[in-house]
Image (tube, rainbow, N blue to C red):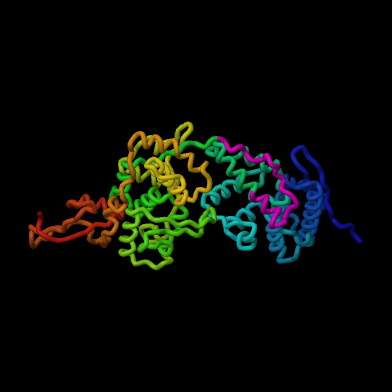
């Protein structure tokens, strides 16, 4: 009985190499994946030898495709190997490969995706909180694409992930991840995935990352806030889409997280009493409070205009769809520029400060509230901050705002004077003469009062701003 082919494992300067016979006395030298241990390399060599024997039996040993396929099988991570073997099986006409079933091990990206998708929360609600963060999903995409010696982080089987891998990742973080706080956030994501693999998934016995792995927190950068006059300029600018102005004005006056506001439903509001109740939020700490008077009046007008169902979202895009937070910070800065708000601190990064983000509208709420005598408890009831340390970050700016006499934010319903103007069909967005009566022209009433000419109306319509159109003699 012929001896079963097992191939030969050798060590080169760069990696472990599998030596196998493909046809006659010709032997191939195939570099194995760098992540494999020696025992795993021996098993992989046996798989390659058995695969080569099947191709010889099928009379395909001389095919260049076969050589390339064997090379792929050698260099593949354990997670990718089943796919390569499936391709080989199809090339052999569906014949089962004698290499046997290869156990598929969950990869780093598998666990990250199950966490961010909410799958782990559904299966283990007592130990895994629901994950709802677009920023962390974006960071995971960056992490999983980092190359670690020919294999991406996302493809590494979780039981082969080591401290060396983690240290390589931290060295290869994107250039923009300079600050200690940002780097720590990436490190926390890696550490959390490994902790989930230990429990409740029970895929590994222990977390390979030691206690001191995470970068030190460091001093956070300073972030700007909108001054009341800047807020007023933005919210009254008719060239900024009204749905954006509505959201930005709400955030600066109520202090919600942007994720909370964009998931807010009409059923969360009591417009008769004038309150809002948040049950599902980041800290799992239900809270409710009385709405600002101007915000309440604005929402009442909006409710009358839309006549929504309780489950409808309060803040939507101009097309009625859910609010898109992709590049929301760039969107805010662009609108500020359009409104003539061009203070450098809002648009440019400094050595120890960052340009404004949508999240900083929440900071605007805290800063202006403290500057005008509101207590920390009053602020925290609305923001959901659970420690004085978080609120205290804003006290220095609040003292400056008070000393400068910046005042309070103007009522939202006064600034959004065009909120309840009905939209008009695109066909009527240009002024037209009535040739039969030269004294009659379609007049356009500005949302903020006064009359507009054709150029004004075209500008408004192109930015999705609603206007009123009425006919009558020229005034």
Range shown magenta = 192-218
- Give the farthest residue toward the right: 1
Residue in the image at 74% along x and 45% along y: 31
Closest to the observer: 112 or 14? 112
Image coords of residue 186 (percent x, y) = 59, 44
Q: Viewer-proximal residue, 445 or 225?
A: 225
Q: Quadrant of residue 225?
A: top left
* 33 displayed left or right of 245: right
| Position of the N terminus by quadrant | bottom right
Q: Give the x, y percent position of residue 183.
A: 58, 40
- Where is residue 298 shown, x and y percent of the image? 32, 57
Would you say residue 213 sits in the magenta stretch?
A: yes
Q: Is residue 172 visible?
A: yes
Q: Main secondary structure of the magenta part?
A: loop
Point out the image quarter for the C terminus: bottom left
Above or below residue 14? Residue 431 is below
Residue 65 visible here: no
Is residue 460 one of those drawn in magenta?
no
Please name the residue shown 59% across and 56% down the image: 129
């Amino acid at each position: 009985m012929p001896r079963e082919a097992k191939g030969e494992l050798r060590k080169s300067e760069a990696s472990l190499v599998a030596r196998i016979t493909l046809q006659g006395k010709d032997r191939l030298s195939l570099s194995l994946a760098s992540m494999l241990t020696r025992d795993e390399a021996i098993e992989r060599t046996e798989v390659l030898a058995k695969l080569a024997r099947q191709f010889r039996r099928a009379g395909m040993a001389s095919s260049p495709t076969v050589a390339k396929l064997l090379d792929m099988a050698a260099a593949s991570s354990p997670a990718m190997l089943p796919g390569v073997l499936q391709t080989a099986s199809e090339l052999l006409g569906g014949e089962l490969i004698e290499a046997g079933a290869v156990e598929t091990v969950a990869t780093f990206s598998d666990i990250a995706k199950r966490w961010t998708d909410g799958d782990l929360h559904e299966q283990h609600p007592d130990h895994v909180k629901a994950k709802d963060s677009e920023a962390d999903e974006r960071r995971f995409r960056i992490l999983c694409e980092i190359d670690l010696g020919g294999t991406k982080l996302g493809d590494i089987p979780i039981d082969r992930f080591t401290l060396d891998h983690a240290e390589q990742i931290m060295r290869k973080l994107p250039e923009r991840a300079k600050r200690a706080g940002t780097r720590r956030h990436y490190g926390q994501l890696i550490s959390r995935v490994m902790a989930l693999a230990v429990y409740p998934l029970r895929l590994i016995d222990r977390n390979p990352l030691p206690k001191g792995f995470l970068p030190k927190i460091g001093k956070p950068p300073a972030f700007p806030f909108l001054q009341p006059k800047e807020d007023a300029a933005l919210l009254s600018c008719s060239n900024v889409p009204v749905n954006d102005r509505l959201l930005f004005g709400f955030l600066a006056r109520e202090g919600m997280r942007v994720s909370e506001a964009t998931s807010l439903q009409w059923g969360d509001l009591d417009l008769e009493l004038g309150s809002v109740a948040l049950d599902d939020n980041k800290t799992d700490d239900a809270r409710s409070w009385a709405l600002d008077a101007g915000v309440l009046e604005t929402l009442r007008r909006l409710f009358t205009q839309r006549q929504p169902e309780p489950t409808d979202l309060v803040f939507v895009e101009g097309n009625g769809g859910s609010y898109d937070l992709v590049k929301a910070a760039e969107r805010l800065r662009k609108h500020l520029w359009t409104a003539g708000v061009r203070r450098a601190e809002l648009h440019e990064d400094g050595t120890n400060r960052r340009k404004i983000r949508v999240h900083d509208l929440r900071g605007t709420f805290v800063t202006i509230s403290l500057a005008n005598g509101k207590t920390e408890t009053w602020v925290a009831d609305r923001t959901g901050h659970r420690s004085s340390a978080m609120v205290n970050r804003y006290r220095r700016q609040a003292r400056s705002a008070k000393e400068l006499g910046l005042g309070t934010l103007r009522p939202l319903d006064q600034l959004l004077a065009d909120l309840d103007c009905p939209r008009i069909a695109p066909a009527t967005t240009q002024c037209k003469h009535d040739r039969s009566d030269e004294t009659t022209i379609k007049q356009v009433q500005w949302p903020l009062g006064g009359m507009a000419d054709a150029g004004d109306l075209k500008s408004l319509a192109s930015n999705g701003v609603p206007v009123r159109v009425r006919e009558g003699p020229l005034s």
